[in-house]
Image (cartoon, rainbow, N blue to C red):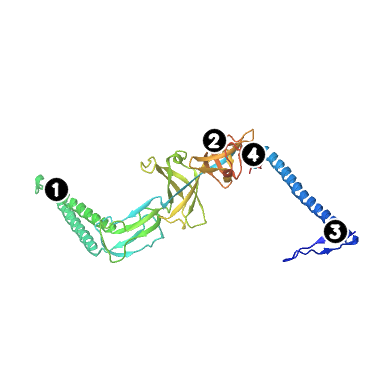
Amino acid sequence: MNFESRKWRSGAVDSEVIVVDDATAARRRRRNIILAVVALLVIALAAFLIFGRGGGEEKAGAAGGGAKAGAPEAPAVSVIVPGRQQVARTISATGTLAARRDMPVGIAGEGGMVARVLVEQGQWVGAGQTLAVIERSVQSQEAQQLAASIDVARADARLAQQELERAQSLVSRGFVSKADVERRIATRDAANARVRVAQAQLGASRARIGRLDVRAPAAGLVLDRNVEPGQIVSSGSGALFRIAQGGQMELVARLPQTDLSTLSVGVPVTVTPVGSQQSYQGSIRLISPIIDAQTRQGEALISIPFNRELRPGGFAAAAIQAGATVAPLLPESSVLTDDAGTYVLIVLANNTVQRRPVRIGTVTDKGVVIAEGLNGDERVVQSAGAFLNPGEKVRPQRAVAR
């Protein structure tokens, strides 16, 4: 089969006839068919991809909408039921170490120059032991003079007695009158009185000499020494020594009024000096009857046996065993604090969270004692309570109480 094709050329009106045979036309038809089939396949594939993905997205959207429409899964939290248990109540306090009986020792007499100092700080002394000696050469001479005046007075008294005896022997013979005998009796009595006066003066002098020795008023530990040989001292010089009677020490602990009211004499106390790992056992010996109006605190005097590590003036901490209390005990992670106060979060029967204000008591190594706010049978959030809100739904999981 032949085809006639007209081809136009530029600048001419002539036409050119192209003859196409049947074989060439068949090839062209096959090619067109193949191209059409390929185009249809491409269109079908594109339609499948477009409409197939859209359906998936619609299904995913439908599934997501269903998840949003349902309730979100509640978070799981660990809860603890603390119960009530007996917990030792310990009150912590701080204070200053001091001698239980701090005795200042000074000059009792007129004083003078210190000749010798016989003790040092940290030395034990006995009652009446000489601590320092004051120079006494002048006083010794005065004592010797008074001793000699006693001998003179005794000699005068003996002479008066002898004259009285002779006069009495002559009265019966009439050589001496009774008036003369009475005068001699008076002379003898005066002589004896002068002996006693001289003896008293000597005793007073010796007592003054004895007061020149600085002596310990009681047995104890020398805490301080403020005198050296050659120093001039007098009754106005102040304390030359300080002695802790019996070496007994005490801690002067300051406590709030509320804690002080729960204590009594004899309560055991553990005292730990600052910077030391060693603790010492003592007991409360006195509770101050006065509360400071400014600080609302009072003093508890804690008696401690002597130990060289306990130095007066040092700082120490005290743990006072103030009996026991029966109360819920929670881990520290369960107790929260904000501007409104201290609280815990409990899980109600419908598994919603509720805030419960509490008042804490003693903080121990095992946990925090809840003084008020809990009965002990509540389900308390053990940890991560700061991430929960009151009224929030949770899935409680029981934890084991420690």
Q: Amino acid at mark 3?
A: Arg
Q: Which residue is mark 3?
A: 31
Picture disc at residue 20? none
User: Which residue occupies the foreground of this view, 302 or 181?
Assistant: 302
Q: As shown in the figure, which amino acid type bears the numbered disc 4?
A: Val
CA gap, disc 2 to disc 1? 97 Å
Q: Nearer the viewer, mark 2 or mark 4?
A: 4
Name the mark on residue 394: 4
Element type where label 3 sits in the image:
helix
Q: Is residue 219 left or right of residue 192?
A: right
Q: Is residue 196 left or right of residue 325?
A: left
Q: Which residue is mark 1?
A: 186
Residue 121, given in percent of the width and then of the height, sits at 39, 61
Instruction: Indicate the secondary structure of the residue bearing disc 4.
Output: loop
Left or right: 386 in relation to 43? left
- The amino acid type of the residue labelled 2 equals Gly
Is residue 194 something that shows in the picture?
A: yes
